[in-house]
């Protein structure tokens, strides 16, 4: 993840991991890290819409509570997506970008 609400996202410290999501299309699941906590859940794509459902609640990280809350908000508020090359934008119910990822397709 490189942006949340158009603001750059970086690890809070050298021990903090990059925020990432990996989608497993075959199983309809995602996994990753919020920087401090591991993420896991399911996703559904229907009619161009995308929803994410976390399988575990995020604990608030003492190092970077603001980012942890923002990542939780992205997971809860995602209703759509847009892919352009290596860029994945997650969109809210109004079609506004709430997060941006850059990565490699597997």
Image: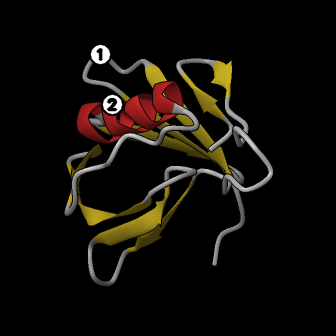
Question: In this rendering, is residue 106 above or below 94?
Answer: below
User: Is 105 drawn above or below residue 59 in the view shown?
Assistant: below
For the N terminus, the quadrant is top right
Does dot 2 land on a helix, a strand or a loop? helix
Q: Residue at x 24, y 37 (%)?
A: 76
Q: Residue 69's image quarter?
A: top left
Q: Which residue is nearer to you in this view: 47 or 89?
A: 89
Closer to us: 105 or 21: 21
Indicate left or right for 30 with 12 as reference. left
Task: Look at 71% across and 54% down and name the residue there.
Answer: 86
- Which residue sits furthest right? 14
User: What colour scheme has been applied to the protein in the rendered image?
Assistant: secondary structure
Q: Residue furthest front?
A: 62
SS at badge 1? loop
Q: Position of residue 53 (x, y in %)?
A: 20, 53
83 up-or-down from 22: above or below: above
Residue 57 seen in the figure: yes
Residue at x 63% of width, y 79% of height? 106
- Taking the view exactly as shown, the residue that stands out farthest to the bottom is 26
Q: Where's residue 27, x and y in %?
A: 27, 82
**CA distance separating discs 1 and 2:** 15 Å
| Residue 30: numbered disc | none
Q: Which residue is mark 1?
A: 94
Disc 1 + disc 2, Cβ < 8 Å: no
Q: Position of residue 20 (x, y in %)?
A: 57, 56
Q: For the residue carrying disc 1, how many other residues have a C-alpha within 10 Å: few (<14), some (14-19), or many (20+)?
A: few
Horizontal side of 82 relative to 2 (left or right) equals left
Q: Report the residue at 80% width, 51% height from top.
A: 14
Residue that numbered label 2 is attached to: 73
């Amino acid at each position: 993840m490189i942006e949340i609400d158009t603001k750059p996202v970086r690890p809070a410290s050298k021990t903090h991991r990059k925020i990432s999501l990996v989608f497993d299309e075959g199983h309809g699941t995602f996994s990753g890290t919020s920087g401090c906590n591991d993420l896991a859940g399911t996703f559904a794509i229907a009619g161009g819409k995308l929803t994410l459902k976390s399988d575990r609640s995020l604990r608030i990280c003492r190092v970077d509570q603001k980012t942890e809350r923002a990542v939780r908000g992205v997971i809860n508020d995602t209703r759509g997506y847009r892919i352009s090359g290596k860029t994945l934008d997650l969109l809210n119910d109004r079609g506004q970008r709430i997060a941006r990822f850059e990565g490699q397709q597997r």
